[in-house]
C-alpha cells in the first residue's frame, strides 16, 4: 500500500512538529490522499484521528466496513446508529489537549465535541493540505496522463465539433469525448464562452449559439484516476481578426514567459506581478481580473494560489496552473491555461495542446 503508508508517516511527523496532541481529518480528499480509499458515508461521521506515538484510528459507521482500507498501523473504530459518534470520538481525547481540525469538519460536530470536552484546545490545521502541495512521483505521473487526455479532447473539439452550436452542446461534446478516453467524470462544469460571454472568466453555460466572427473560450478538465486536469484555450470563429490576434499574442507571450519563471525559490507573488506588469505595458492591466494560477491535484483548486500577496516560494513537486487572461467587458476575453509541475531547476508543462492563434470554420446551416 505504498505510498499511503509513507504519507501517513509524514502526517504523523508533521502533526508532532506542529505540537498537536491529535489531528482530526474529515475531508474526503484528505482521507483519499492518506488512505488511498474513496470513503463516502453520507451524513454519518467519518474521522481519521492522528495522534503522535499512537496508532492512527479511523472512526466510521459499521455499515461502511467494505470501504475501510487495509493499512499498517491503522485501527478501526466502528459505531452504530444507536451510538453518538462524537461521544465515541471524545473517549479518545481529553480536556486541555491541543486538537488540530482540518478545514471541512461540520460545525455541528465541533459544537458537540466542545460540549463533551469544553476545555479542549481547538485549532485549524493545514497539515494534510501542506503535504498534498508536494506531489510524489505516482501523483505526477497520474496528473501527466490526465493532462494528455485533456489535450486530446481539446484537439478533438477543434477538429470535430460542428459549428454553429450552442455553448451547452459544446459542453456535451466535451463530456462525450472525455468518456471516449475512459474519463467519465469531469473535474468541473466546462466554461464555454461565445463572443462577449468569453469576457466572464467563470461564465455559466447557456443556450447561446455561436456567431460568425467571434471568439470561443473553452475551459475544461476531467478526472482521471481521481486526479484533475484543467486546460483553457481561446479560438476565433470565422475570418482573420487582427485586433483579436494582437491581444491574443500579448496573452500568449505573457503566459509563456510566466512559465519560464517557474522554478524552486521563486515567490508566487513574483509570477503574478510579472503578469500584471506585462499587461500594464500595453495598457491592459485593468482587464486582468483574477489570480495567475492555482494548485491542482485531487481537487481542481487545492494548495497554492498564485497572486501578488502570496510570498511563499515555489518548491519541487508542486503542480499548478499558469492562466493569465484579458477580459474586455461586453466584447470578448482571452485566456490560455496550462498545468506545470515544478522540477529541481524549472518546470515541466504538462499540456502540449497548440497555443498558436487558431481560426475555426463556420459551416453554417
Image: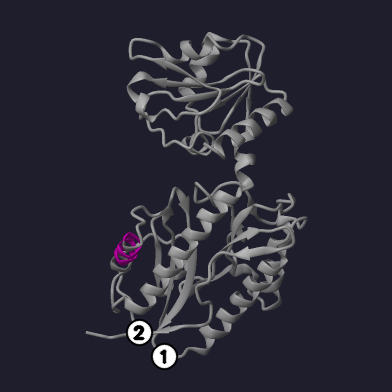
Q: Residues within 10 Å of mark 2 (few under 14, many from 20)?
A: some
Location of mark 1 (residue): 239
* Quarter placement of the C terminus: bottom left
Question: Which image quadrant for residue 130?
Answer: top right
Location of mark 2 (residue): 212
Residue 69 in percent (x, y) is at: 44, 30
Q: Do the residues under discs 1 and 2 have CB atoms within 8 angstroms?
A: yes
Q: Residue at x 46, y 90 (%)?
A: 240
Residue 81 in percent (x, y) is at: 33, 14
Up-down: is 152 above or below 141?
below
Q: Which of 321/288 is in front?
A: 321
Q: Residue furthest left?
A: 365
Q: Is residue 253 left or right of residue 170?
A: right
Magenta span: 171-179
Q: SS for tag 1? A: loop
Up-down: is 333 above or below 297?
below
Q: Residue at x 59, y 32 (%)?
A: 8
Q: Residue at x 63, y 40 (%)?
A: 131
Amino acid at each position: 500500500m505504498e505510498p499511503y503508508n509513507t504519507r501517513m508517516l509524514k502526517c504523523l511527523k508533521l502533526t508532532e512538529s506542529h505540537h498537536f496532541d491529535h489531528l482530526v481529518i474529515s475531508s474526503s480528499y484528505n482521507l483519499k490522499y492518506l488512505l488511498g480509499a474513496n470513503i463516502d458515508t453520507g451524513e454519518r461521521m467519518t474521522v481519521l484521528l492522528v495522534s503522535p506515538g499512537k496508532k492512527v484510528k479511523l472512526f466510521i459507521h459499521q455499515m461502511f466496513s467494505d470501504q475501510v482500507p487495509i493499512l499498517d498501523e491503522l485501527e478501526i473504530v466502528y459505531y452504530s446508529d444507536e451510538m453518538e459518534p462524537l461521544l465515541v470520538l471524545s473517549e479518545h481525547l481529553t480536556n486541555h489537549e491541543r486538537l488540530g481540525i482540518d478545514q471541512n469538519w461540520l460545525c455541528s460536530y465541533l459544537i458537540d465535541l466542545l460540549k463533551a470536552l469544553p476545555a479542549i484546545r481547538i485549532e485549524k490545521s493545514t497539515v494534510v493540505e501542506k503535504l498534498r502541495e508536494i506531489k510524489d512521483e505516482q501523483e505526477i505521473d497520474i496528473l501527466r496522463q490526465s493532462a494528455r487526455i485533456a489535450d486530446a479532447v481539446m484537439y478533438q473539439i477543434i477538429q470535430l465539433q460542428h459549428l454553429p452550436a450552442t455553448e451547452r452542446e459544446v459542453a456535451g461534446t466535451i463530456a462525450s469525448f472525455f468518456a471516449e478516453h475512459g474519463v467519465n467524470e469531469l473535474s468541473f462544469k466546462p466554461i464555454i464562452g461565445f463572443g462577449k460571454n468569453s469576457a466572464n472568466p467563470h461564465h455559466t453555460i447557456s443556450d447561446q449559439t455561436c456567431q460568425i466572427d467571434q471568439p470561443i473560450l473553452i475551459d475544461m478538465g476531467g478526472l482521471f484516476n481521481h486526479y484533475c486536469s484543467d486546460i483553457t484555450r481561446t479560438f476565433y470563429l470565422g475570418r482573420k481578426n487582427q485586433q483579436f490576434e494582437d491581444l491574443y499574442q500579448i496573452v500568449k507571450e505573457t503566459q509563456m514567459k510566466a512559465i519560464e519563471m517557474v522554478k524552486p525559490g521563486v515567490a508566487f507573488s513574483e509570477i503574478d506581478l510579472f503578469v500584471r506588469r506585462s499587461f500594464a505595458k500595453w495598457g491592459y492591466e485593468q482587464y486582468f481580473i483574477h489570480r495567475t494560477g492555482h494548485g491542482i491535484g485531487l481537487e481542481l483548486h487545492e494548495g497554492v494560489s498564485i497572486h501578488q500577496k502570496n510570498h511563499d516560494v515555489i518548491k519541487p513537486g508542486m503542480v499548478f496552473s499558469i492562466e493569465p487572461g484579458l477580459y474586455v467587458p461586453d466584447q470578448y476575453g482571452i485566456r490560455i491555461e496550462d498545468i506545470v509541475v515544478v522540477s529541481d531547476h524549472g518546470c515541466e508543462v504538462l499540456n502540449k495542446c497548440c497555443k498558436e492563434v487558431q481560426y475555426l470554420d463556420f459551416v453554417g446551416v
